[in-house]
Amino acid sequence: MIKINKIPEFRKNDRYKRSGYRAYNWKMPPIYDSCIWMKVCKIDLLDEAVFRKISSSDFSIRILDVGCATGRLLYKLAKHGYTNLSGVDLAPRIIEVARKKLSNFKVNLNLKTADSEDNLPWPDNSFDVITLTGVIHHFYRLYDALKEAYRVLDKQGKLIIWDPWFPFIIRQIVNSWLYFFPHDGDFKFYTPNRMENTLTEIGLKNTQYRRIGIWVYIITGEKLS
Ligand SMILES: C[S@@+](CC[C@H](N)C(=O)[O-])C[C@H]1O[C@@H](n2cnc3c(N)ncnc32)[C@H](O)[C@@H]1O
């Protein structure tokens, strides 16, 4: 595992990123996959919803998982037969876990470290599907991050996002709390409406949203250009 002892210089206003980087570079790599939230959130159910949204019989489609962490979703995609898989994460050490986990699959794997709010290190139109699962509440610059995803999405490509959903009052309390006490990179829980507007603003069409259980929403949009 590579040793990186210094937190990179993030922009001044990205103070959440420091706490996220700390958590996902040092604390999370050995414990993330078995942490209690995976069970509480019924992660398999959420992944199934993502698979249904991908719904492609072409297993060579190019898939990018933004904020891929330990490669949890990429691993399932590889097991399912998808062969063109890419992932990006802010934290280099957690990416190394993903690399190790996927090393036994014969897939075209491309894992990179980057801040997806600044830059996704791929050329325009590189992917048919982009997933952001449990990631957008880490984004301080939501629009920038999604615009960048739009850039690397191919012309008929699909963006698939899920994130926790909270009733209004609880969301206000959690978001206010996070403002003062950043926790493991969590910045803000956005509403599905806000997400739908942002997806439309960046240029995506056919946006569709639905809740999964009472705790998560999934939203998709297509590039269609
Ligand atoms: C809660 S985890 C979700 C991981 C994974 N997508 C899943 O479904 O289990 C959030 C991940 O997003 C990454 N992340 C947060 N902000 C990011 C950014 N600006 N660019 C790239 N990755 C980011 C974190 O390092 C962390 O690995």
Image: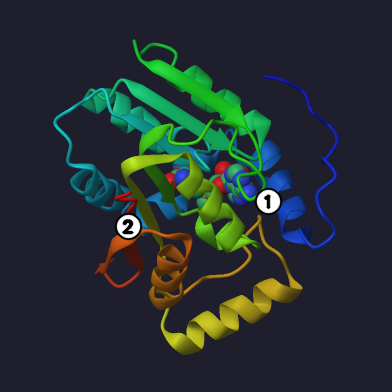
Residue on which disc 1 sits? 20
Q: Residue 70: which disc?
A: none
Q: Nearer the viewer, residue 156 or 103?
A: 156
Of circles 1 and 2, the one toward us is: 2
Q: Quadrant of the N terminus?
A: top right
In the picture, measured across the screen, residue 124 lies left or right of residue 214, that is: right
**In the figure, 60 relative to 32: above or below?**
above
First of labels 1, 2 by sequence position: 1
Residue beneath label 2, please? 221
| Label 1 crowd bin: few (<14), some (14–19), many (20+), radius 10 Å | many
Whole-percent x, y for residue 22 in the image:
74, 45
SS at badge 1: helix
Question: For the point 50% across and 72% down, which residue is it?
Answer: 190
Residue 141, how many percent across, how many down?
64, 61
> How far is mark 1 from mark 2, CA to CA?
27 Å
Q: Quadrant of residue 15?
A: bottom right
Residue beneath the point at 60% across and 77% down: 175
Is the residue indicated by label 1 positioned so its CB lies within 8 Å of ligand 1? yes
Query: In the drawing, does residue 120 fall left or right of residue 9?
Result: left
Which secondary structure lies at badge 2?
strand
Q: Amino acid at mark 1?
A: Gly
**Viewer-proximal residue, 170 or 152?**
152
Give the amino acid type for the residue marked by disc 2 in the picture: Gly
